[in-house]
Every structure is written in structure tokens, then in C-alpha cells.
Amino acid sequence: MQEEANNNEMSFEQKIAHAKEILEKLMDPEITLSQSVTYYKEGIKELQEATKLLENAKLEFETYNQDQKEPT
């Protein structure tokens, strides 16, 4: 459970770096099919979470920019 909490606190950059590490593991010709499936699922999860963080950041920028355009 603690690992899941830490995973949710990872930054966008950390998630991308972790996905790259997983990709390197997937490229290892010595891993088993089972390990490949596990790494694949983990990598997809990291990329989905990174995408969500990126979308949230984009929304923050858009909201901020919209707020700046509105007259006070």
C-alpha cells in the first residue's frame, strides 16, 4: 500500500524515467514471457499516469491563461 502511495506522488518526469527503465527491461532477451507481460502492464500504467499528469498541467495552464484574459 505504501508503494502505491509513493507511486501516486511521482512526478511526470519520474514516471517517464520509470517507463524508460521498464522499456529497457522489456528489451532484455533473457526475460520470460510472464515477466514481459508484467513489465508491459506496469509500463502502460506508468504512461497512463504520466499522461494524466500532463493533461492536468495543461488544464491548469489553460485555466490560468483564461483567468488572466478576464477583466477584473
Image (cartoon, grey):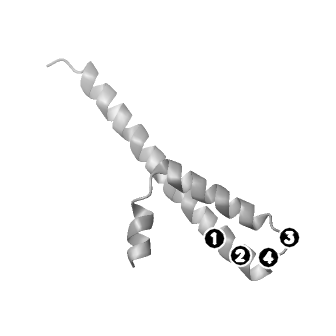
Callout 1: helix, strand or loop? helix
Q: Position of residue 35 (x, y in %)?
A: 72, 78
Identify residue for label 2: 37
Q: What whole-number distance in Å separates the C-alpha atoms at marks 3 and 4?
A: 6 Å
* Residue 69 image offset from top left, x and y in percent: 27, 20
What amino acid type is highlighted by mark number 1? Lys
Percent position of residue 43, x then y: 62, 64
Q: In the rendered structure, are the residues bearing label 2 and label 1 in contact, judged by CB atoms less than 8 Å apart?
A: yes
Residue tagged 4: 31
Quarter location, residue 4: bottom left
Spatial distance from mark 2 to mark 1, Cα to Cα?
A: 6 Å
Picture residue at 79% right of the left edge, 79% below the top: 33
* C-alpha distance separating marks 2 and 3: 14 Å
2 or 3: mark nearer the eye: 3
Identify the amino acid type marked 4: Ile
Within-10-Å neighbours for mark 3: few <14, some 14–19, many 20+: few
Classify residue 57 as left or right of residue 68. Answer: right
Q: Give the mark nearest the N terminus, 2 or 3.
A: 3
